[in-house]
Amino acid sequence: MTKSASTLDFASAGGGAPTAAEIQSAKAKAIGGGPKKCTKGKSCSATCIAANEDCLVEFPEPVQAEIRKMVGFIMKKGNIEPGSERDVELGKSATLLGQQLTGESASGKDKIFTTTKPGQSRLLTALEIEDLKNNKDRLGDAEFQQKAMQAWQKDVNSRGVKLGEKDVALMYESLPQSAKNQLNNSGNPGKGKWYGKDKEGNEVTDANNGSKTRGIKVLQMYLQQGGTDAYGKSSRVFSPADFDVEHVRPASKGGLDHPSNWVLARSGAQRQRADTELKKWIDSLPNPRNQSEMKAYYSAAAKKAKGKSALKATLASMDAKTMKDTDLIKISPSNMKYLFNRDSFFVSGLYGLKTGGRLTNTQPAVFGRAYGLARKHLSDEQVAKIRSEVKQVWNKNWMEGGGSTKNMVRDYIKIYKNALPKESFALLRPDIEKWGSKILADFPQTSPKAMAKQ
């Protein structure tokens, strides 16, 4: 970086961390848009981010790489005045997001926002519960009173970086596609209730899937909240993948999937609430100062988790080939995989209808059961052929190729009808036909992925 360069300009040169010679020559050069010495005592001004608030070389190399990519894109696409407030805010945003882009997508080609156990599944801590109880009335009123909701949103959205809509869109476009998909699909309001835009560009809340419009709004909220949990006052920063869109008024109770009804809440807490009224949910939490109540709270959760583990272990020990078909199809496909050496095709391998096209979707439930019957009755070679045929029909012909939904349904059913024993297929036929009618009603022409390309 030289002269009065942009706080983002370190990325424009590309490459890795500065060399020793570059560091030596940069000692007296500009930092953060002006000729000043690094307040951290560093000498590598070529790596300053956001007006010297962070140093790029302090991050692990994978993080450095992602921040450089993002900022390189922004510098190329944006008309940024060096040292301006916009320059600084974009630099802060790139630093915040880049630190979270350390995961790897299913394809291995993209970086994704990493999920963490504390964000995704950890129970509430005593401090979090105390915070919720202290703010019970304020949060509870937000569910039913517009002014209270707006006050809560104003509070949490003042914690981080506030970018203009164009800069948020620019930041969104700088992300890998897999990371965009994570933002697009944060929270699930239910089919036909997603926030987005129609063909005329008008805001709607009746889409079937997450979209770019929604992803940009989620990103804007994440940056405004500074990566913190809307439920509490903690300054701890989580990844975008650790959050769900929290519908302050639940969709099941008439709340819209719209930014006016959103905050971002840590998934581990948000999913505990589900659609319970906020005040009632907070009241149901244990007294954080009562050790016996807290112990019972954690013990109940551990017992539930242990029960799930026990079920998996039981299924893994069973011989599926000796089971009756009627008993086998009562097991959910996600659990059925443990009967068959954790076969991943039960839970991945197909483009998802609600996952922005990621290859991490389960099969439609009825075909997951059909696949389980195939694993029971057929040889490994025959099962491998089914997997290949299903991927061809669903992923290649329909999702990517834009083939007709009618042909996809016909071919999908034909695969299992031809492969399974007649009596086994007959067990599932009513549900298969019901699924076919529904997907034809939802997508009468072709797949959502193909329609998005048109």
Image: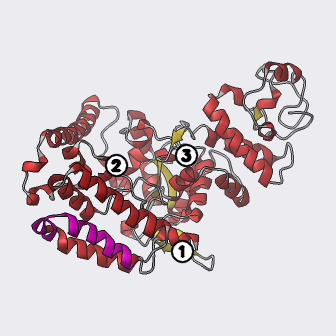
Instruction: Using the image, tell me which numbered label, if any, was put on residue 204.
Output: 1
Residue 454 occupies which quadrant of the picture? bottom right
Q: Nearer the viewer, residue 116 or 344?
A: 344
Query: Percent from the top left, x then y, of residue 5?
Result: 87, 38
- Name the amino acid type tagged 3: Lys
**Which badge, 1 or 3, is on the more N-terminal residue?**
3
- Name the amino acid type tagged 2: Gln
**Which badge, 2 or 3, is on the more N-terminal residue?**
3
Q: Residue at x 45, y 64 (%)?
A: 396
Q: Is residue 306 left or right of residue 144?
A: left
In this rendering, which labeled residue sits more in front, label 2 or label 3? Answer: 3
For the record, the magenta segment spans 406-426
Q: Which residue is mark 3?
A: 109
Q: Secondary structure at mark 1?
A: strand
Question: Which image quarter is the N terminus in?
Answer: top right
Q: Which residue is mark 2?
A: 272
In this rendering, which labeled residue sits more in front, label 1 or label 3? Answer: 3
In this rendering, which labeled residue sits more in front, label 1 or label 2? Answer: 1
**Which badge, 1 or 2, is on the more N-terminal residue?**
1
Q: Residue at x 45, y 71 (%)?
A: 447
Residue 58 on the magenta span: no
Instruction: Using the image, tell me which numbered label, if any, was put on residue 117.
Output: none
Query: Percent from the top left, x then y, of residue 6?
Result: 84, 41
